[in-house]
Image (cartoon, rainbow, N blue to C red):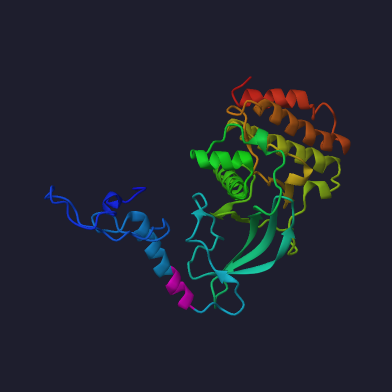
Amino acid sequence: MLTHDPYDAYDHFDTFDDHNDNARPARARRKPKFEDDPQPNRSGRLTESARKRLAKARDDAVTAEMELPPDADRWSTWADGEQGPHPRPDWLITDLAAVDRELGVLKTGKEADVHLLERAIPDTDHACLLAAKRYRSNEHRMFHRNAGYLEGRRVKKSREMRALANRTAFGRNLLAEQWSIAEFAALSRLWSLGAPVPYPAQLNGTELLLEFLDDGDGGAAPRLAQLRPDADELADLWHQLVAALELMATGGLTHGDLSAFNLLVHEGHLMLIDLPQVVDVIANPRGPEFLHRDVTNIAGWFTARGLPDRLSDPVLLTERLLYTAGMG
């Protein structure tokens, strides 16, 4: 894009130059153009970005004319963001005529709030429940430990790199979006591998829509930290966890912040949640350190509740996982 008017040099002339037949007459100084305004290119045609903005404006105008049902909070955002991996589960509502209803807050946190959302097709019984995880942005201090997790992750634009490093308001907003993108990518990859994670339905900016894992009575599935399993249940949950960690290791990954608070028990199955800080064990120089910390933290919880030391030795399990990741 030109940064100046090529004819500005002629603006101070009031007459033709008698010595130059090709000289241009005086021109009125042009008003500055703003990059957000749809502008034609030099050939008189709209640029691709301008064409997309105009198309979106037309779509928004059509949507605005549609009457939102009185009990709905918004139209489905399915067409607006990045969609989850294939094959998509049968329960997921992808109809663009669907509406979203806010049903309440499931969890609040320093980094994100999780809301319960119903997506339904009006005048039908077709509906699904989703957990809407919404990352906080520039008005909050977030991810105080993010420096180590971000090693190995890069953004291409130098302006964005400076903003992230200096934690400007733009940088904090960008950081929130980077975390939502990272979690959506991690969940999509792990779900495709067959790991026990909720299905990542959609990503739209800093909002991540996930499969809602319930407790069978209309509430959310409990976190592992809330439970007091007996000896048999404890051993079963530990073996499930080890299998999940091994599956992550085959992809070169570790959770990055694993604890009994980041594990749900849904219908007897252990489910990994809260994965924005997932660590690439191989690409991140501190990857083995994060893996060892994950294992030590969660093994300590199981040991404190009666799991035999011979099953939950963190050193042996870390070595086993590193070997699985190809680093043994």
Label count reads: 0
* Above or below 162: residue 134: below
Q: Which residues are magenta?
A: 60-66
Q: Quadrant of residue 145?
A: top right
Q: Quadrant of residue 149?
A: top right
> Does residue 293 appear left or right of residue 253 in this picture?
right
Q: In this orientation, does residue 195 appear?
A: yes
Q: Any magenta on residue 65? A: yes
The image shows residue 224 at horizontal and vertical percentages of: 79, 46
* Above or below 264: residue 212: below
The image shows residue 221 at horizontal and vertical percentages of: 74, 55
Depth check, front residue: 73 or 40: 40
Main SS of the magenta part reads helix
Q: Residue at x 73, y 45 (%)?
A: 262
Q: Any magenta on residue 311? A: no
The image shows residue 21 at horizontal and vertical percentages of: 11, 50
Q: In this orientation, does residue 306 appear?
A: no
Depth check, front residue: 63 or 18: 18
The image shows residue 307 at horizontal and vertical percentages of: 84, 34
